[in-house]
Amino acid sequence: MTMRSALEIVGAGPLAGDVQVHAAKNSALYLILASLLSDEPVVIEGVPKLSDVLVGLEILEHTGVKVAWDGPDVHLHAQRVRDTSAPYRLVSKMRASFVVMGALLARAGEARISMPGGCAFGPRPVDRHIKAFAALGVEVSDDNGDFVARRHGPLTGRVVFEAPTVGGTQNVLLATALGDGVAEIENAALEPEIADLAELLNRMGARIEGAGTPFIRVHGVDRLSGTRFRPIPDRIEAGTFMLAAAATRGDVTLRGIRPDHLVAVREKLTEAGVRIVDVARDAWRVDATGELTAVDVTAVEYPGIPTDLQAPFGAFLATVPGVSVVRDRVYPDRFTHVAELQRMGARMELTERTLVVRGGPLVGAEVHAADLRAGGALAVAGMAAEGTTRVLGVESIDRGYERFAERLSSLGASVARVELPSVPSSASSPASELVVGGVAAG
C-alpha cells in the first residue's frame, strides 16, 4: 500500500521560544545556477535542503555540473557543460528552473528548456523572459513545446520590462554577465534576491551596477572565477513564523533575519497590534499577547508585503476579530487556500479577486495544500484552531519550508509529520467549496 504524508496539527496554544531563520530558498535557487558561469568551483553556504533546491541541483547535474554536499554547504563545479537542455521531467516541477536558460546562454551560447511548472495558482507566462532575450539579440524559437534559445554574439541592448519580474531580471543577469556586450535593464525587479545574485556574480568577477534599483547595467566580462557565498536569510520563512506567532497569540524571537527585508511585514503586524521589538541586529521579538485588530493587506512588489505571504496573512487575519480585506496585486488569483480555510470555519468571501475576512475562531479539519504558501497558511491556521487539523499535500510545503514540523514543535506547537494510506482518486473526498460573493461555487 502506498502512503502519503500529512502534517497533523493540534491547536496547542501560543507559540513561544526562539527560532533561527534559514537561508532564502528564493535566492539559493538562482545562486546555484550561477555556478554554470564559471569553470572553477563555487560553494554556496547554508543551503536549505528543500525539494525545489534538490530539483535545481538535479538540473545542474544534468548539464554536467558536479554537485556535492558538505553539511549544509553545496559544492558546485561546472568544469564543462555536457548538455544544454533542461528536460520536461525536471522543469515541470518548478517554475524557477526556466532561469537556467540565461546561465546556459552565457556559458554555452544555447539552451533548450521545456515550459516550466510550479505552483498552481494561475497563469505565470514566461513571455517577459522571451521578450527580454529578444531585445538582447537572442534567437528564441518553439520546438515541440521546448524553448530553444541561441545567441550569435555578445548580448547587448536594453531590456524594458512592462512590469517588474524577479525571474526575468535574474535570467537577464545570468545571460549577460559573460561576454563583450553591455546590457541595461529598465523596470528591473527590486526584490533582495536580485541584489543577492548580483553580489555573488560580482564576487565572481562580474561587473553589475544598480542591482536593487529599477535600472541595472551589466558590462560583460571574459570569464568568472569560483568563490564561496552565503545567501541572504529567508524573508518569507521569517514572515511565516511571525504570522504563526501572531495567529497563536504567541511570543517568539526570530534570529538570523535581515530586518530591512521585512519592514512592510513589521509595519502591518504592528498596525494589527503585534508588538515587535529589536533584540539584536539580526533578531526580533514578536509579541502577540496583547489585543489585536483587523487590518487590510495588499500584496505588491518589494518593498511591500510579499505575494508569498499573502496566504499566511489571510490565515492570521481569519483569527482576528473584525473585518479585513486582502488583495494580491502580483498574482491576483493566488487564493487556493481560501476554500480550505473555509473548511476550518474561516468566514471568508472572495469576490472579484478581493478577499473579505471576518475574523473569529477556527476549528480543525482535513485540508489540502494546493501550493507552497497555501501550505504555510494552513499550518498557521491549524496551530491557531481548536482541535486537530490534518494538512495533506505536504510535498508542496516541502518546496519551501525545511524541517517545518520539527521547528514549529520547538516553539511549543503540536505538529507532527504522519504517513497515511493513499486512497484511489475515485474514492477521494469531494472538492472543497469556495464561497464566491456569498454563493458556493464548486
Image: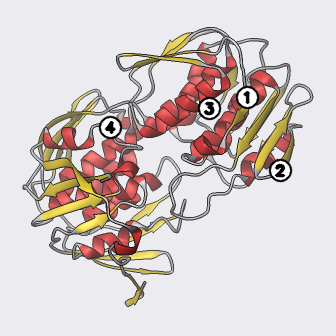
Residue type marked 3:
Ala
Pointer 4 local density, CA inside 10 Å: few below 14, some 14–19, many at least 20: some
Q: Is residue 321 visible?
A: yes
Q: What residue does disc 2 label?
A: 142
Q: Quadrant of the C terminus?
A: bottom left
The residue where tag 4 is placed is 402
Compare residues 234 and 130 and report the one nearer the observer.
Answer: 130
Three-letter residue code for mark 1: Leu
Residue 104 is labelled as: 1
First in sequence: mark 2 or mark 1? 1
**Spatial CA span between label 4 and label 3:** 28 Å
Residue 351 vs 74, above or below: the answer is below
Point out residue 250 in the picture as x, y percentages from the top left corner: 12, 50
Under circle 3, the secondary element is loop
Q: Which residue is mark 3?
A: 211
Q: Amino acid at mark 2?
A: Asp
Taking the spot 60% from the left edge, 27% from the top edge, the residue there is: 60
**Residue 427, above or below 50:** below
